[in-house]
Amino acid sequence: MSDYSKDLKVKIFGITTGKSICILNKIDAKDFGLFTGDRVELYNKRSKKRAVGVIDITANELKSGQIGLFEDIAATLSAKEKDLIDTKVTKSLKSLDFIKKKMDGKKLTNEEVVEIVKDITDDRLTDVEASAFIAAIYMKGLDLDETVYMTKALINNGNKISFDVTPVVDKHSVGGVNGRATMVIIPIIASAGLYMPKTSSRSITSSAGTADAMEVLAPVDLDFNKIKEITKKVGGVIAWGGAVDLAPADDKIIKLEHPLSLDPEGQVIASVLAKKASVGSKYVVIDLPVGPQVKIKDQKTALRMAEKFVHVGKEIGMEVDAVITDGTEPSGLAFGPALEAKYALEILEGKRFDNLAQKSCECAGAVLELAKKVKVGKGYEAARVILESGKALAKMKEIIKAQGGKIFSSEDIKLAKYKKEIFAKENGVIQEFNIKLLTKAARLAGAPADKTAGILLSKTVGEKIGRNELLLTIYAENKQKLEVATEFIEQNCPVTFKKIIIQTIRD
Amino acid sequence: MSDYSKDLKVKIFGITTGKSICILNKIDAKDFGLFTGDRVELYNKRSKKRAVGVIDITANELKSGQIGLFEDIAATLSAKEKDLIDTKVTKSLKSLDFIKKKMDGKKLTNEEVVEIVKDITDDRLTDVEASAFIAAIYMKGLDLDETVYMTKALINNGNKISFDVTPVVDKHSVGGVNGRATMVIIPIIASAGLYMPKTSSRSITSSAGTADAMEVLAPVDLDFNKIKEITKKVGGVIAWGGAVDLAPADDKIIKLEHPLSLDPEGQVIASVLAKKASVGSKYVVIDLPVGPQVKIKDQKTALRMAEKFVHVGKEIGMEVDAVITDGTEPSGLAFGPALEAKYALEILEGKRFDNLAQKSCECAGAVLELAKKVKVGKGYEAARVILESGKALAKMKEIIKAQGGKIFSSEDIKLAKYKKEIFAKENGVIQEFNIKLLTKAARLAGAPADKTAGILLSKTVGEKIGRNELLLTIYAENKQKLEVATEFIEQNCPVTFKKIIIQTIRD
């Protein structure tokens, strides 16, 4: 069927919105019968490029007969001023029916999931529609089949890197908080002769992501070829995943999940495994921390997720082991990119061995066992030997150098110039740190955007502390942020002490 | 707690987006730790006005230290170029927790519903967040209590009109399709001495809304005072509801429901009754058409909704009767604003009496009975007498005149200049019209934006039609739209004929 269409003349607006927005004069919008937020199909007659746009409506900024393009969609259409754009109303998208179907609690077929992922990838779904889809999978869930469909659809609609080396391995932590085990694990694994090209995220809600922390030591904004080259040469790399667009639909979904902190289980599994598959990982260890303050609150949920990870991995030809770990206390003492990077280097340098180092060796051991480098039961020991021998530190220096970094020692890491020490107000034994409050305080101090800002604890859970002894230090890049974070810590005590009297009974 | 804040200098962008969008340079966004779509609290130091903005990020259009304001938010802040805006990250909204609570299937309290409605009214929730709320109430439902809370919250967060006359009555149809019973009912009711100030919608998905059709005869864009004045003077008015902002949160919710055609039952009930309450309606008849092609598919759903309407009405001090009506065939023969307006006038002029006239008299009768103008059981007869006496036509002319209209006769209504007649391809008796296909075709022809476009059937369900006899006529304002609609009708037959052989059994 032919559709009603019109040629409109381009006017470019130099604004980036991250979305495919175009503007119509209200007369043209009325002629098409369109409202703000509706979609149009655009075809640039000069460049022969096509795009789908979401419309805003203006009375004054454009004349009837013009179409305004923001920079994002102007680029897609290779549009110049005064190009003629053949404009028509998009047919209703099939994927909207499939989203509605999921909202009505019905199971989606492989084809339906593929269609939704394609439309998200190509920006044909608006944020409002994609948000409804995420709400639907949060409320109605993705079953095991749907999770497999989603994983495959994400893989097929993204980029892939194929390495000439083998085996490629990986490790991923679901919903941990602070501490950069990855920066300890990768040099151990690479020292053992496996290949671990890690693409990691920047933080959205925590005090630092692995990419934020690694960036303190070396550039992480690496392209495909660079990642391949470094992996081949030194066995490991810690890059920012956003630069390589492994699963663009997933990146968009994660952005929309952020405001309501939604993380539908099936989507988390699909998201993680698709990204590992895109870099050709053969052996993947999934770390599932459990604790009242982390994402996974109980063993039962962790076990269910573990089984799904293993199953979906198998369906896409990947060997997955899932490990359930203790997530009841902070991993190490640091919150913030520079502090966490320094901390990880100190572990590699043999200056610290605490719960973060322990976890790193256990997880590295699990990878060595899964990849059959060592016998089952011998992984932890092998990893610890590599760490203590100094080989992991030497390997980390190679990785930093290969990525173009210049900082090789924990002592060379600069911290923020403003700091405030917070002292204990009573004697006692530390029972618990409130990780949420510490994260919030680190963020108020400026982390992760301000790399050198954050919080460093002086004590671990279970340690004694005396009144007026140093509890923690806040670091910030300017005075105002230091004050805001300090005020927050003073008003919201992030530590509880062990009490012997549990309850008092009175008359 | 004090927050990190900065003064940024205004640069105004003359674009209307319908949303509170502001733009930050990427350096400032990073300094605040903000991403596209996050919210900032803004305070204009000169005008002392406050607003909440949702951010876009730019690298080039602004320098660090500037803030870009689109027209909507510039107006809210009474901002001029170079005003200083105290900018800070908004604290997380409580309503986000309540939306999450609903998503998790828990019942909301009155206070929680109030908070969400307030944040939607004041644009503090982004479209993505509000969309997740709508998805939540679609999937998890609003129970009877929550529906009452929602209704009251919509009433309290909107405008009200109070009339000096009594009683004010109303009638509302849920999910009907074509045909403008309202334009017949109001003059009947007003002739009987009741007051019926109707604020109605423009169409979003059908071929015309009541406001679209009435606008063919008279202006509908009336303000508070005008609606009051006309109601007092002639007893009835048919205005566009969008001009009086009776329930701004509801208008925003409806806009977000549109892309996925979501209409959570509780929200429909709250939306309808809040708008009636805002104009002080004392007696309200709710028409619930049931049929396979309309919104309510079965009697059971209609009955459940009917009971909820009556209950919620009582809770807000309104007498509500709900009537379940036959929605299995088109109401009258017209699809499109001018065609439907003409059709309604022809009924008032005594030129037609069909299922639309019948329905109008029955519904008007139900209103007369509810408002105790006539005894129960005598309403239909009373309404029909008023219609047949010509009093309703005279009243409609008074209403048109009072609203400033100039068209008083069906013969003066102009139709589109391009038309195409479609003929039957076989002999038979009409069993069913496909209302969705007819609506789609009317919209392809240009309705409702093009007022004179649409479709006029020549036959009703149950009538005989001969091969090559006129089945329907398509009207359009330009040739291209006429061709598109004609092609659609020819490829998608909108009529089925009665068959005697239901099934053939073969070897």
Image (spheres, coloured by chain):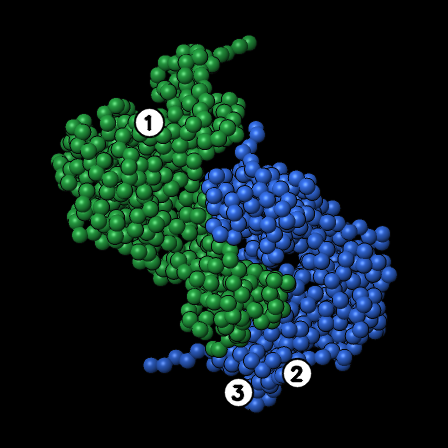
Chain colours: A blue, B green
Marks 1/2 same chain: no
- Residue at 36% x, 43% y is B201
- Image coords of residue B99 (percent x, y): 45, 57
In screen coordinates, is A139 left or right of A177?
A: left
Any mark on residue A417, and which? 2
SS assignment at label 1: loop
Q: Chain ID for label 3?
A: A
Position of the C terminus of chain A, as image quadrant, is bottom left
Question: Which kind of residue does numbered mark 2 sit on?
Answer: Lys
Q: Are marks 3 and 1 in contact (CB under 8 Å)?
A: no
Badge nearest the viewer, 1 or 2? 1
In screen coordinates, is B339 left or right of B421?
A: left
Position of the N terminus of chain A, as image quadrant, is top right
- Image coords of residue B358 (percent x, y): 25, 27
Question: Which kind of residue does numbered mark 3 sit on?
Answer: Lys
Observer-nearest of A198 and A122? A122
Any mark on residue B332, and which? 1
Q: Earlier in the sequence, mark 3 or mark 2?
A: 2
User: What is the residue that sits farthest to the top in this orientation?
Assistant: B507
Query: Image height check: is B350 above or below A10?
Result: above
Q: Are marks 3 and 2 in contact (CB under 8 Å)?
A: no
Q: Chain ID for label 1?
A: B
Q: Residues within 10 Å of mark 1 (few under 14, many from 20)?
A: many
- Residue at 72% x, 65% y is A182
Question: Which kind of residue does numbered mark 1 sit on?
Answer: Gly
Q: Are marks 1 and 2 in contact (CB under 8 Å)?
A: no
Q: Chain ID for label 2?
A: A
Q: CA distance from mark 1 to mark 2?
A: 78 Å
- Mark 3 lies on residue: A425
